[in-house]
Image (spheres, helix red, strand yellow):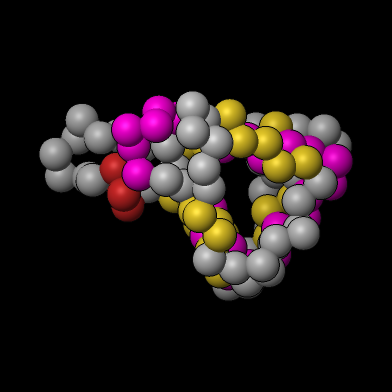
Amino acid sequence: MKRLITIITCTAMAAMAWLPASTQELRISAGTNLNVDGTAQIVLNNTGLVNHGNFNAGQGTIVFTGAATIQQPMISGVRTTFYNLTLSRPAAQLVLNTDIS
């Protein structure tokens, strides 16, 4: 069964006491495909990307946004290839725990 997702917005919920902001991430599990259709944009606000599956960038954009006071987002898991990766954070910082291209 195929699922089509064209736009995803992830926002860390720091105000929710039972769910710390540091646990928020877009996770692609093993055996899962995330296909960016055409020029879609995925916005990750105060959150990271963990890729253990297959990320197909298409001609899309991944945007990391958020406040400088929130923990730096990270990219981890398997090597991930992006078509367009944008940092739109005050300090423009991103932690890389894997290779990207």
Residue drawn where x is 77% and y is 59% of the image = 101
Q: Quadrant of residue 19?
A: top left
Specify the farthest residue to the left: 17
Query: Would residue 86 be seen by someone viewing this image from the given angle?
Result: yes
**Image position of 42 with respect to 50: above or below:** above
Magenta residues, as a range? Answer: 49-71
Say whether residue 52 is magenta: yes
Residue drawn where x is 31% and y is 49% of the image = 22
Left/right of residue 28 with respect to residue 36 in the rendered view: left
Query: Would residue 26 be seen by someone viewing this image from the given angle?
Result: no
Q: Nearer the viewer, residue 8 or 49?
A: 49
Residue 83 x/y as whole percent:
81, 46
Left/right of residue 72 with respect to residue 60 in the rendered view: left
Q: How many labels sit on residues?
A: 0
Residue 75 x/y as whole percent:
55, 57
Residue drawn where x is 68% and y is 53% of the image = 34
Left/right of residue 13 with respect to residue 34 in the rendered view: left
Q: Nearer the viewer, residue 17 or 46?
A: 46
**Image position of 14 with respect to 95: above or below:** above
Specify the farthest residue to the front: 91
**Image position of 17 with respect to 89: above or below:** below
Residue 54 x/y as whole percent:
70, 64
